[in-house]
Amino acid sequence: MSSPIALRSALTATPVSYGFWLTLPSAGVARTILRRSPQYTEGGFSWVLVDAEHGLINDSHYYDLTNAIGHEGVSPIIRVPWPEEWMIKRALDAGAHGIMTPMCHSAEDAAKVVSYCKYPPVGVRGYGPMFAPHAFPGVKPGEYDEKTHGEVLVIVQIESRPGVENVENIAAVEGLDVLFIGPFDLAKQMRVTRGGEEHEAAIQRVLNAAKSSGKKAAIFCSDGDDALRRVQQGFDMVSITTDVAVFGDGMLRELEKAKGSSKPEAKREGY
């Protein structure tokens, strides 16, 4: 029996799970992109990161976004602003298929996040999923506990020097599903050059720790070329770009065409 969570099924059934960053609070934007994508089993998207940490998205947008994404056969993963219990509870009760938390520095940090995502006796998540089932096609309200408990994905970001130094212990935490690398913050927090030798060594250490513990390894990528390189390195889950990057790059590209310009497209180095 397949999981009601597309990303969990994709992580099991496909070599790599592709997603993208949604920073704008628009169900229309998410659905427009997803309607052009093939099914994840054919190499399409299996997840969308709903960015409530750095994006323009907040708690009031969660319900509409999780429903729009979930009913396209794709998993909405909400990145909450901070790994606090009430923030995680609100995101899950709005229908998130998984939670991503920033700045995981230790195994203790990871264990707390797991506990906040799971009902007792596994964890301490408060009970009241009145609206959560709406984002799971085919799951009736009375089936939410049975069909999603244990299935909701728990993802922590490794993006600091302590996180890297403790990554083997973090990866061993029971109930944790994915170690996700934030490469921009990782470089800044470590005070090293992004893409430099020390930065890349830290990324590889996280990748190896995840694999050794039977967890999935994931990473934020700036574009498709960056994502392909990480897939070839063995990452299980990659984001290919952000909504705002596509809009900005696409508009400028078409503007240059309209002007008859042959100026080569500049490499984007950020979000």
Image (cartoon, rainbow, N blue to C red):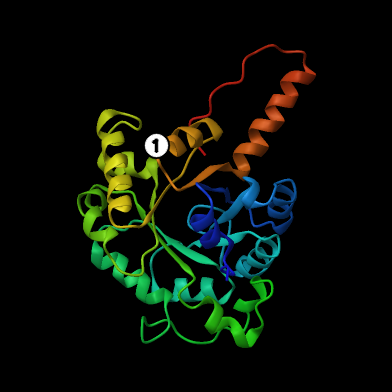
Q: Residue at x 31, y 65 (%)?
A: 110
60 w.r.t. 227: above or below: below
The residue indicated by pointer 1 is: 233
29 w.r.t. 99: above or below: above
Which quadrant holds residue 82?
bottom left
Q: Quadrant of the N terminus?
A: bottom right
Could you tell me which secondary element the residue under label 1 belongs to? helix
Name the foreground residue: 130 vs 175: 175
Q: Residue at x 51, y 62 (%)?
A: 8
243 w.r.t. 25: above or below: above
The location of residue 241, given as percent across then percent down, is 56, 41
Q: Residue at x 40, y 41 (%)?
A: 234
* Residue sitting farthest toward the right: 258
The location of residue 19, given as percent across then percent down, is 56, 49
Query: In the visual, does 113 lie left or right of 260?
Result: left
217 w.r.t. 71: above or below: above
Q: Residue at x 28, y 66 (%)?
A: 173
User: Number of marks in the image?
Assistant: 1
Which class describes the residues within 10 Å of circle 1: few (<14), some (14-19), or many (20+)? Answer: few
The location of residue 227, given as percent across then percent down, is 50, 37
The location of residue 257, given as percent across then percent down, is 76, 19
Query: In the visual, does 41 lie left or right of 91?
Result: right
Query: In the visual, does 106 lie left or right of 239?
Result: left
Name the foreground residue: 54 vs 159: 159
Looking at numbered disc 1 in the image, what kind of residue is underneath it? Answer: Gln
